[in-house]
Image (cartoon, grey):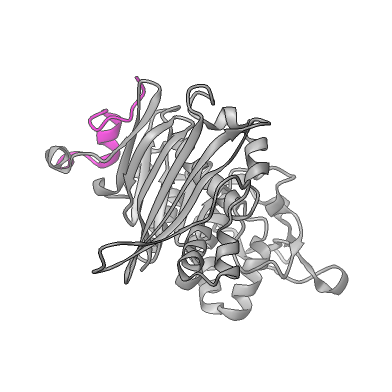
Amino acid sequence: MSKLVTFQVRGYRSLKEIEIRFRSMNILIGANGAGKSNLISFFKMMNELMAGRLQKHIALTGHATANLHFGPKVTPQLEAKLIFDLDNGTDTYDMRLFHAAGDTLIFAEENLSFHRTGYTHPRTTTLGTGHKETLIGDAAFDNRDTTARTLRYMLNRCRVFHFHDTSPTARVRQHCYIGDDRWLMPDAANLAAVLYRLKLQSEGIYRQIVATIRRIAPFFDDFDLEPTGAGDNNIILNWRHRESDLIFGPHQLSDGTLRAMCLISLLMQPADQLPLLIVVDEPELGLHPYALNVVASLFQAASLHVQILISTQSSAFLDSFDADDVVVVERDGEASRFVRPDGERLREWLEDYTIGEVWDRNIIGGGPH
C-alpha cells in the first residue's frame, strides 16, 4: 500500500518547523490553540493547491500574512516536503512558496523526485519558479512523467473532510448533480449521489452502510434515493422512517444524525474507492457516545486499507485507539510541537487507566496550561 511516511513543513501559521512520521492511524490531541487545526488546514491548502485554486485559497484565508508564521516580516517563505513510500521506492514532493506583491504566495521552487530501492541517487524533476499555481498537472500530462503522475494521484488522494456545517443551508441538505458521484466531497455535498451509485453498483456495501446507520438511529429505515429534475439529473438525501410511510427530507435529520451518516458513508466505501489519507477534524462533534464508539470502530477498520489523520478533543473517543496512534500537540513558545508519547513511560499507566484517562490526567501532555 502506498502511504505518506514523512511530513515536513516550515513557516506555516504556528507550524514553525515540524516533522511528523505518519503511521496508519494518527490521532492529534492537545489543548485549544496548540496547532492541531493548523496541521489539518495545511492539508486543506494542499487540496486547494492540487485543484489549481491556491491563490483563491490564500485570499480567502487572510492572504499570505495570515498563513505565514508571524507574517512575512518574520517568515517570508513557506516550505513543505511530503515523502510517500511505494512498493519500489519513495516519491517526494517538495515546494517552497515565497511572499509576493498583493500579499500572496508564489512558487520559489517545486520539485518532484523518485528514489528507487537499491539506487544511490533519486531522479528529480524541477518544475521551475515564479508560478502562481502548481505545475504538477502539466508535468503529469505534457511530459508523461511517471513520477509526476504518481505524485499527482497521491497528493490528490490526501483528502480533508469537514462535516461540521449541518445548517439548513448546508450543501449536504440540498439537491446535487447525480453524476457527481465518483468521490465524496469534503463537505459531503454529493452524499446522495454517492449513496445512489453504491446502491446500484455495490449493493452489499450500501446495505452495510444502512445497517450501521440504523445502529445509531433506530428510527431510520432506509434512504429513498430517486433522480429528480430535468433529465433526472438531480438527487437529494431523502429517507424513510421505520414507523411511517412518509418520505422525509434531509432537513428533517438532526445535526448529529446527519454528521454520523456522512462519516459512516465515508468510512464504509469500498477500499479501492477510499482516499489514500483521510483527514478529519473533531469527528466527535455532535455525536452521542454510542455513535462515537461506532464511528471510532469504522476509523479503525478503514486504517487497515488507508491512512487516517484525526484531530480530537474527546478523551472518550481517544479511548478507542492505541497509545501508539497518538500525536501530542503542544505550544513551545509561539510554535507548535508534535510528539508521540513515550511508550515505555506509558506502559505502567495503561495497566490501570485508559489512554483517554491518561490524557485527562495530563500524563502525556497536550492539556491546557
Closest to the observer, 137 or 243: 137
Residue 321 in the image: above or below residue 177? above
Image location of residue 4, percent across then percent down: 38, 56
Q: In which quarter of the image is residue 105?
A: top right
Quarter the N terminus occupies: bottom left
Image location of residue 323, percent across then percent down: 25, 45
What's the residue at 55%, 78% (across, down)? 202
Image location of residue 152, percent across then percent down: 52, 62
In the visual, does 51 lie left or right of 228? left
Image location of residue 261, percent across then percent down: 57, 57
Q: Is the magenta stretch mostly helix, strand or loop?
A: loop
Count of picture labels? 0
- First to last magenta residue range: 350-369
Q: Quadrant of residue 367?
A: top left
Magenta highlight on residue 362: yes
Can residue 18 be seen here? The reply is yes
Closest to the observer, 364 or 110: 110
What's the residue at 35%, 37% (across, down)? 18
What's the residue at 51%, 68% (across, down)? 149
Residue 5 in the image: above or below residue 114? above
